[in-house]
Image (spheres, coloured by chain):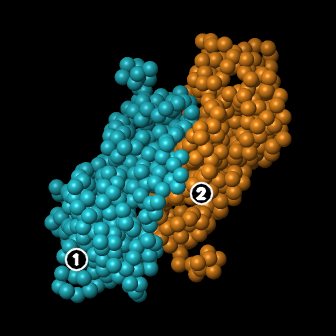
Chain colours: A cyan, B orange
Amino acid sequence: MNAATKPSRLRDTHVTLSHGGGGRAMRDLIEEVFTDVFRPEGDEDQARLTDAALATPGARLAFTTDSFVVTPLEFPGGDIGKLAVCGTVNDLAVGGARPLWLSAAFIIEEGTEIALLRRIVASMVREAEAAGVRIVTGDTKVVGRGSGDGVFITTSGVGVIPAGRDLGAAQIRDGDVALVNGVLGDHGATILAARGDLALSTPLESDCQSLTHLMEAVLAAAPGTHAARDATRGGLASTLNEMAEAAGVTVELDEAALPLRTEVKGLCEILGLDPLYLANEGTLVLFVPEAEAEAALAAMRATPAGRDATIVGRAGPRGSVPVTMRTAFGGQRIVDMLVGEQLPRIC
Amino acid sequence: MNAATKPSRLRDTHVTLSHGGGGRAMRDLIEEVFTDVFRPEGDEDQARLTDAALATPGARLAFTTDSFVVTPLEFPGGDIGKLAVCGTVNDLAVGGARPLWLSAAFIIEEGTEIALLRRIVASMVREAEAAGVRIVTGDTKVVGRGSGDGVFITTSGVGVIPAGRDLGAAQIRDGDVALVNGVLGDHGATILAARGDLALSTPLESDCQSLTHLMEAVLAAAPGTHAARDATRGGLASTLNEMAEAAGVTVELDEAALPLRTEVKGLCEILGLDPLYLANEGTLVLFVPEAEAEAALAAMRATPAGRDATIVGRAGPRGSVPVTMRTAFGGQRIVDMLVGEQLPRIC
């Protein structure tokens, strides 16, 4: 039956424990709020999928998962649903995979507004369409008041890595150029400002966006690309430390080249934070052989997600300090991994 | 470096917010508690997988997800980790898929004991080995005290459905025989008894177990099997209602044939519950053409998970009441879907 013409059986405005109990109330919630919108195929508790790319000789399946616990659930530039789609799509894309299918599992706190759930689900469908993936299976659980916090979403993603592609931090070589596709720290700064206890008003928006199309454009223009990572929790600094250690190289950043909004710099100065550690949700760092750096840069700039793409540094030979930064004053400082936490529940 | 010889950097006994922050503390927790035990391949945030079965003509990929929020986290016969592996493996197996790979995403409340996490992870690895699957990718998030409840785990699973297999509730036909592999309600009754507020002491254990090997044995012996479902939340009654409605058939259960432990019956009588609605975590219901019913029964009984297998009912023609039960006194009663909740956070 068509979702638009089906009479609603869901009379409640807020989620109760009975919506998680396995009976009629749960079925009504799942049908009206989730499956009528996601429209998975079939009635079984598993998606059954075929794609010619999977059967291509040399192709590999890529599989990833992330839980999202961001607070607040809705923020300028996105919400937990958009984040849950983009985050998992991006984990697939930066590994060179074409994302195909997502699962979505919801842990919902008793008392959550059903209208909020509907907005989150609509946002997920919009973002999945933009990224070219389908949400094909899911689950809902309900926990009592005070045992959760609104909504947590776990998405898992399956994609296909075409034969011959092998991106990974271990491939980075001395001399590689490091590029980012956009400004740094917008997501972290936006979430920070959106938290009620700070009550800061800024024009900032999260950079939350899927990077599928950008990655495909880069890999077409610069097929020798060695590695890509989305610089999420821990920010660019932590991501680069992980990559440099995995590759056995050093990375030197150029402070003057780092793309930062005035508002992010300002917020960081007020709060004593370093934008290099702020989370991003649509910003990646690429390592490309020097010969292909300009091609990668041009390809990124030609996509909506890469308009502010720029070269930010370079890989060097193995050394005792994985990541350093040439400062605007000509000095050099260590860029360590984040120690402890800068901001909990950022994604 | 070998996990056994690596010096521990994880000094804490309990999880703090810094273990979720994206920095060094998070990396130490993830490495020592999770990846040193799960041993995924590669350094990237995605698993890269190949399996000949995926490329076989006509094969389909099966993909499913479930969040687990059971309380208490450890209970007689299992824990949330074992449950998270079995639950997702079983969702794949009952659809006729051979489970191959799992992801595991953890949402951990600040203050959770790290020793508890280690026990849960060890239990997941043991159960994955028993079920013949690998945990290949994962995630951890930390939420503040009171924003979660110990540990929530979301597992997703990928498997392969061989060419020609098409199990599903819609395939059930008038005349099919309904079988279960074991006693009903052990999981629900065990969790209920294990909750501190009841303080009941029983010899019960959860039936939590993976059904991969049992399903393969059934499908080899009774290749005409129409459908299988694990009777989890909502119990056998809700599962049969969903299946009967999807198939457009009725199902009549035989009360005298239902396999129930004396302890489960007793607990249900004391608490005014119906064991048909109690959750199971290693019990499935099969619909098989009459000609193959004995073969399916014998195949189940030859596996450890099917020793108590029995025929419990039969599918009939479409009718106004999807599921009924012939009672021990010769009457007939309606077996409705669970309305509301019998027990929250059962899985």
Residue at numbered disc 2: B135
Residue A81: x and y in percent read: 37, 46
Around disc 2, counting alpha carbons within 10 Å, would you say few (fewer than 14), some (14 to 19), or many (20 or more)?
many
> Which three-letter amino acid code belongs to the residue tagged 2?
Ile
Q: Is residue A54 above or below residue A228?
A: above
Q: Nearer the viewer, residue A242 or B115?
A: A242
> Which three-letter amino acid code belongs to the residue tagged 1?
Glu
Quadrant in the picture for the N terminus of chain A: top left
Q: Nearer the viewer, residue B297 or B189?
A: B297
The residue that appears at 76% across and 32% down in the rendered structure is B222
The residue that appears at 81% across and 43% down in the rendered structure is B303
Residue A280: x and y in percent read: 31, 61
The residue that appears at 54% across and 30% down in the rendered structure is A43
Q: Is residue B323 above or below residue B227?
A: above
Q: Is residue A105 above or below residue B139?
A: above
Quadrant in the picture for the C terminus of chain A: bottom left
Secondary structure found at label 1: helix
Residue A124: x and y in percent read: 36, 42
Q: Is residue A307 visible?
A: yes
Numbered badge on residue A255: 1
Residue B133: x and y in percent read: 65, 53
Q: Nearer the viewer, residue A192 or B200?
A: A192
Subunit under mark 2: B
State how far apart marks 1 and 2 are (Cα): 40 Å
The residue that appears at 42% across and 51% down in the rendered structure is A98
Numbered badge on residue A76: none
